[in-house]
Image (spheres, rainbow, N blue to C red):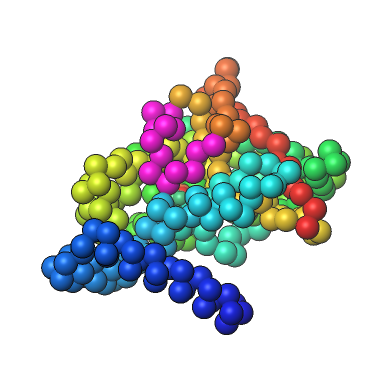
């Protein structure tokens, strides 16, 4: 980052924080409690989590206000680069006894000019189907890259991937972020969601999430990530064994 820019942003940040100290007459006990909180946050490795839920939606807003592509939303703290490249027919890696209902998620990727984009890469990750949802490589007890994978669109710009319906996610209660939410009287729950980074040469990479109709946490997402265009129906598949769900979405990338 250019030194000039670091100065500009850090000076504004410090000036704003000093303003809060003056306005609220923050005292020494409170100052030391804030330091302790930040130390605990770091020790618990929750700095990415807290910044994602408190601030990332605003970064998304200022970055993507003018986008002509699909609705974006926050990437969140749990993306892991280098997820397995899948071979068709695509199936996110999952355990033999993976809990949850089967989900076939399909759709297309196209440009803002309406042309399909063959060879677009979708990097997809999600929580498990048991409540509250858990992420591999984050929460213990799951195989590496469970429910994480990358795959590409076919020559029609289409894709289809088999996975399970994710469960709603709750920020853990026994960590600094969960304790802060409790103190603020805020819900620590996120509605069930699928995460995506969609990329293609000469196009802007799209980071987004998809949610499902009728989720009880859509209006109170702890991550502040829900936007109207990102809520899709889960359609029950009739007469299939085992029974499951289908969902579809068409991603639109803008040229870079
Ligand atoms: C998540 O799963 C998530 O996606 C975000 C943004 C914050 C906390 C947990
Ligand atoms: Fe998530």
Compared with residue 48, is residue 28 higher up or lower down, i.e. above or below? below
- Viewed as shown, does residue 16 lie left or right of 80? left
In depth, the one of 62 and 232 nearer the eye is 62
Q: Residue 173: horizontal and vertical position, in percent?
A: 24, 50
Q: Is residue 179 visible?
A: yes
Give the residue at the far top of this rendering.
Answer: 239
Compared with residue 56, is residue 10 higher up or lower down, i.e. above or below? below
Q: Is residue 226 magenta?
A: yes
What residue sits 66% from the left and 35% below the top? 249
Give the residue at the far bottom of this rendering.
Answer: 3
What residue sits 31% from the left and 61% below the top? 20
Q: Quadrant of the N terminus?
A: bottom right
What residue sits 47% from the left and 32% below the top? 101
Q: Quadrant of residue 55?
A: bottom left
Q: Residue 199: horizontal and vertical position, in percent?
A: 71, 55
Q: Quadrant of residue 31?
A: bottom left
Q: Residue 123: horizontal and vertical position, in percent?
A: 62, 53
Number of numbered callouts drawn: 0
Q: Is residue 122 visible?
A: no
Give the residue at the far left of this rendering.
Answer: 29
What residue sits 78% from the left and 58% below the top? 256
Q: Is residue 10 magenta?
A: no
What range of the chain is rendered magenta?
A: 215-227
Query: Magenta-highlighted stretch: main secondary structure?
Result: loop
- Viewed as shown, does residue 255 lie left or right of 37? right
Q: Residue 220: horizontal and vertical position, in percent?
A: 38, 36
In depth, the one of 40 and 22 nearer the eye is 22
- Viewed as shown, does residue 67 lie left or right of 133? right
Compared with residue 245, is residue 27 higher up or lower down, i.e. above or below? below
């Amino acid at each position: 980052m250019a030194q000039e820019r670091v100065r500009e942003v850090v000076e504004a940040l410090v000036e704003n924080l000093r303003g809060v100290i003056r306005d609220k007459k923050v005292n020494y006990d409170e100052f030391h409690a804030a330091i302790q909180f930040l130390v605990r946050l770091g020790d618990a490795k929750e700095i990415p989590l807290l910044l994602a839920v408190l601030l990332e939606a605003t970064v998304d807003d200022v970055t993507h206000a003018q986008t002509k592509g699909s609705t974006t939303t926050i990437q969140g703290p749990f993306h892991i680069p280098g997820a397995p490249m899948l071979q068709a027919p695509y199936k996110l890696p999952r355990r033999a006894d993976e809990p949850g209902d089967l989900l076939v998620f399909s759709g297309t990727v196209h440009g803002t000019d309406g042309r399909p984009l063959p060879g677009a890469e979708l990097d997809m990750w999600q929580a498990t189907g048991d409540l509250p949802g858990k992420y591999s490589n984050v929460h213990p007890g799951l195989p590496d890259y469970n429910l994480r994978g990358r795959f590409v669109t076919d020559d029609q710009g289409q894709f289809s991937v088999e996975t399970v319906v994710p469960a709603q996610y709750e920020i853990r209660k026994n960590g600094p972020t969960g304790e802060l939410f409790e103190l603020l009287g805020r819900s620590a729950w996120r509605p069930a969601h699928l995460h995506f980074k969609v990329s293609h040469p000469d196009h802007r990479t799209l980071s987004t999430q998809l949610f499902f109709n009728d989720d009880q946490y859509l209006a109170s997402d702890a991550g502040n990530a829900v936007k109207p265009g990102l809520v899709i129906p889960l359609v029950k598949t009739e007469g299939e064994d085992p029974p499951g769900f289908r969902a579809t979405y068409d991603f639109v990338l803008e040229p870079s």
